[in-house]
Image (tube, rainbow, N blue to C red):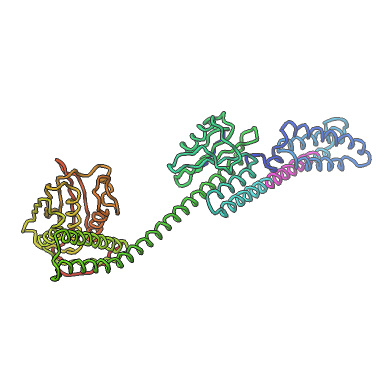
């Protein structure tokens, strides 16, 4: 059975292969016998004029010519027959195989040795010529295949080149089965193929794809199939299966298998390069899109700040104006304007912060900070969001000073507090705790709300992500910003559900109490 170890010489008999094996062995021996007999008849007629030694040269020439067309065994037969016929018909006593004189015996022995050596050398030269021809055809076929694949601009053009070159080299019908988006083998052959894989042979293609070994005709797997299915594998990546429907009835020779193996290896590498090129193009397009998006958001956010400031100023003048007091309904509307403006201002600030984080322009400013002051500022900044919740704060006075970026940490903690207030029912408690544990400062915000669904938990810190039950009005940036601000300081943010209901978010920062100097560190995106 055929064995293509890695999954590639011409599966159809090449001209060189036809020269070497085109004549059956029995035909070669018959050709040698008839030729020698045919040469002996006119030699008998010419013996009176040519002499026995000239006849030996005729036999020697015949051996050399036959060696150009038959194998070594037939050549040895030609040497033996020519020596015996020469001795029987042309060396005295005639006709007899006995040699009368020592001179004739020496001549006979010399002829036999010379004929054998010349025949063997001729056969070796012929075999070497055939080998060089096969190597040349192999190199040419691989060159044509590689050139066709290199010139392909996309995967469709690559597959067309594969089908064209493989079908021409192997004189076979070709089908290419590639993987789908899920990485499974698709049984819809590429339109460029010349062979339609029948339904009963699909298990053979699937077996080749799954096992990484050839299946189908001339193999141990599904040998009843009409085509040979060879997996296209490179660097442990399975790209699909190459189906080769051969026109020859006999099993491919080892040389033919090697050529197919080389073809399959080159095709798999080309598909792998095409896959990497497509992934690079997608990543490049995505990066460019994100860069343009950040630039647009940054530009628009800065432009929005100016009209927002004007709206806030004008609204504040309405409430402070002495000319005409506002009615209760007007004051309510002014309050809504101020609240909406403040929310929009926070949104703009979040967008700008995200842009700074991702662009690497955020500057880290470490300084000694009192944890109690940090928590108090964060609570004060979110007092409006926490107005309908009871707040419990637990910060030991013995914590002392810790070196961190006060503004970034306060914003991260404030985002956690606002998130807890937004996603829990009114009247529920929100707990803020701070403690030192194993060289880290832990700041926790816990609630007794509905908690985090298991599907939401892995994505809770993703940018712009909002859970399916999230209330309206959020942007999905608060937790992402908190994570970015803390990780910029070498810390971590964790989210988990509490026993008994509710969620808990923890900021984990390295305790750097000994660092009492201010420093500025550029933050990578």
- Residue 35 sits in quarter: top right
Identity of the residue drawn at 8% across and 59% down = 399
Residue 369 percent coordinates (x, y): 13, 64
Query: Residue at image x 90%, y 41%?
Result: 51
Q: Is residue 94 visible?
A: yes
**Residue 417, magenta (yes or no):** no
Question: Which residue range is magenta in the image?
Answer: 108-129
Compared to residue 74, the image places residue 270 above or below, namely: below
In this rendering, the count of numbered labels is: 0
| Quadrant the N terminus occupies | top right
Check the picture and name the quadrant holding the C terminus.
bottom left
* Closest to the observer, 200 or 67: 200
The answer to whether residue 439 is visible is no
Looking at this rendering, what residue extends furthest in the left direction?
Answer: 397
Q: For residue 281, which quarter of the picture?
A: bottom left
Residue nearest the viewer, comparing 259 with 56? 259
């Amino acid at each position: 059975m055929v064995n293509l170890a890695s999954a590639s010489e011409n599966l159809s008999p090449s001209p060189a292969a036809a020269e070497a094996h085109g004549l059956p062995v029995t035909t070669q021996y018959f050709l040698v016998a008839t030729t020698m007999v045919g040469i002996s008849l006119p030699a008998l007629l010419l013996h009176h004029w040519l002499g026995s030694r000239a006849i030996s040269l005729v036999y020697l020439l015949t051996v050399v010519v036959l060696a150009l067309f038959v194998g070594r065994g037939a050549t040895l037969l030609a040497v033996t027959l020519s020596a015996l016929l020469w001795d029987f018909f042309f060396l005295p006593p005639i006709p007899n195989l006995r040699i009368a004189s020592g001179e004739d015996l020496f001549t006979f022995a010399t002829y036999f040795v010379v004929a054998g050596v010349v025949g063997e050398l001729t056969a070796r030269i012929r075999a070497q010529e055939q080998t060089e021809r096969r190597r040349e055809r192999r190199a040419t076929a691989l060159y044509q295949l590689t050139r066709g694949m290199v010139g392909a601009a996309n995967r469709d053009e690559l597959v067309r080149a594969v089908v064209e070159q493989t079908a021409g080299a192997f004189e076979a019908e070709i089908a290419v089965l590639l993987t789908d988006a899920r990485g499974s083998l698709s049984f819809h052959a590429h339109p460029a193929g010349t062979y339609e894989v029948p339904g009963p042979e699909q298990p053979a293609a699937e077996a080749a794809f799954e096992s990484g070994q050839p299946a189908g005709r001339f193999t141990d797997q599904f040998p009843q199939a009409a085509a040979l299915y060879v997996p296209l594998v490179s660097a442990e990546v399975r790209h699909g299966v190459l189906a080769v429907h051969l026109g020859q009835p006999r099993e491919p020779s080892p040389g033919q298998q090697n050529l197919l193996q080389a073809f399959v290896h080159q095709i798999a590498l080309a598909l792998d390069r095409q896959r990497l090129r497509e992934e690079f193009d997608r990543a490049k397009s995505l990066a460019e899109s994100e860069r343009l998006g950040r630039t647009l958001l940054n530009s628009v956010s800065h432009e929005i700040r100016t009209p927002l400031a004007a709206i806030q100023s004008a609204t504040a003048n309405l409430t402070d104006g002495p000319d005409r007091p506002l009615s209760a309904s007007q004051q309510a509307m002014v309050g809504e304007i101020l609240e909406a403006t403040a929310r929009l201002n926070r949104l703009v600030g979040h967008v700008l912060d995200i842009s700074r984080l991702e662009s690497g322009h955020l500057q880290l400013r470490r300084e000694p900070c009192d944890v109690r002051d940090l928590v108090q500022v964060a609570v004060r900044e979110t007092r409006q969001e926490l107005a309908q919740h009871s707040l419990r704060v637990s910060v030991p006075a013995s914590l002392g000073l810790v070196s961190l970026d006060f503004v970034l940490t306060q914003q991260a903690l404030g985002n956690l507090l606002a998130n807890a207030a937004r996603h829990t029912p009114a009247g529920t408690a929100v707990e803020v705790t701070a403690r030192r544990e194993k060289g880290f400062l832990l700041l926790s915000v816990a609630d007794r709300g509905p908690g985090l669904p298991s599907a939401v938990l892995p994505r809770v810190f993703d940018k712009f992500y909002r859970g399916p039950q999230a209330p309206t009005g959020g942007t999905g940036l608060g937790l992402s910003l908190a994570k970015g601000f803390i990780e910029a300081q070498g810390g971590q943010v964790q989210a988990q559900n509490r026993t008994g209901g509710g969620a808990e978010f923890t900021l984990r920062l390295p305790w750097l109490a000994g660092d009492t100097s201010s420093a500025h560190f550029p933050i990578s995106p």
